[in-house]
Amino acid sequence: MTIIPKSHPRLNSLLIREKLVKGFEDNLVAKEGLLAHGRGEAFDYLIGEKTSKSAKDAIKAAAFMLKNAENSVISVNGNFAALCPKEIIQLAKNTNSKIEVNLFYSSEKRKKAITKILKKSGATEIYGLNKKSSTKLLGIDSARRIVDKNGIFSANVVLVPLEDGDRTIALKKAKKKIITFDLNPLSRTAQTADITIVDNVTRAMKLLVIESQKKRKESLTYNNKKNLKLAILEIRKNLERRAKNA
């Protein structure tokens, strides 16, 4: 029997799988969310299953943008709620951000399950639940077009983790600044966002919470296109290193 050391990144991947499976059983995660995670695992392997320099730079820029936003919103789907409920609440408090539930595969059962775990983790106000305050984003056909007037619709900065490209593009057309987590630096979401954190969301959220606690008054110089090129270069170097050691 192979024993995996506690510090080994593979153990973290296995724990994440267990959280998502439980999330599926608890109606948080859609079955399609399990498939999406499998794709993410492959990209996480490509980046070396660790937070790279480019990701750390993006995290610093994201914390700065959220803390200086006039009206920021953290968008939450099932996978995000299953993996990072406490970090979502901590980040919202640190950056004075709103929290909105927004689902691609939407159902009242899933909304209630996600709301329950967020409130259990400390959320006091959650947007995206009241149909009377809902409106629609232009340019999307999925259920994610339905947003809260007082949440995502009115926000100037939106954190959209584990995202589909259509909504990212629609939010950009609506003149919003977008922060996202995406392990694929070539995806539409990654290329469209203002700040793309190319990292596993569980690792990155912990670091983002820590970074959001810091007092940083000076502005940061950040270019997402350049940072994505660095992320691609990091992946290439990691693959070359592994090939030499194979």
Image (cartoon, rainbow, N blue to C red):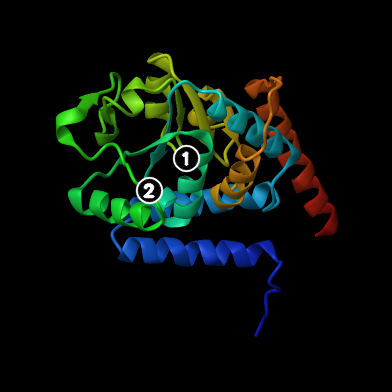
Q: Give the residue type that dot 1 points to.
A: Ala
Q: Which residue is at 51% across, 47% downward?
A: 90
Check disc 2 and give the amino acid type.
Ala
119 relative to 24, above or below:
above
Estimate the x, y position of residue 79 in percent, counting from the top left. Answer: 41, 51
Instruction: Please provide percent x and percent y for residue 104.
Output: 30, 40
> Residue sitting at 71 percent across and 41 percent down?
235
The image shows residue 225 at horizontal and vertical percentages of 64, 22
Element on which disc 1 rests: helix
| Residue 7 image point, x, y percent | 71, 67
Numbered circle sitting on residue 92: 1
- In contact (CB < 8 Å): disc 2 and disc 1: yes
* Quadrant of residue 121 within the rendered picture: bottom left
Q: In the shown orientation, is residue 131 left or right of residue 89?
A: left
Q: Which residue is drawn at 37% across and 28% down?
A: 167
Q: Label 2's element?
A: loop
Q: Residue furthest right?
A: 244
Q: Which of 185 and 107 is in front in this view?
A: 107
Mark carried by residue 123 = 2
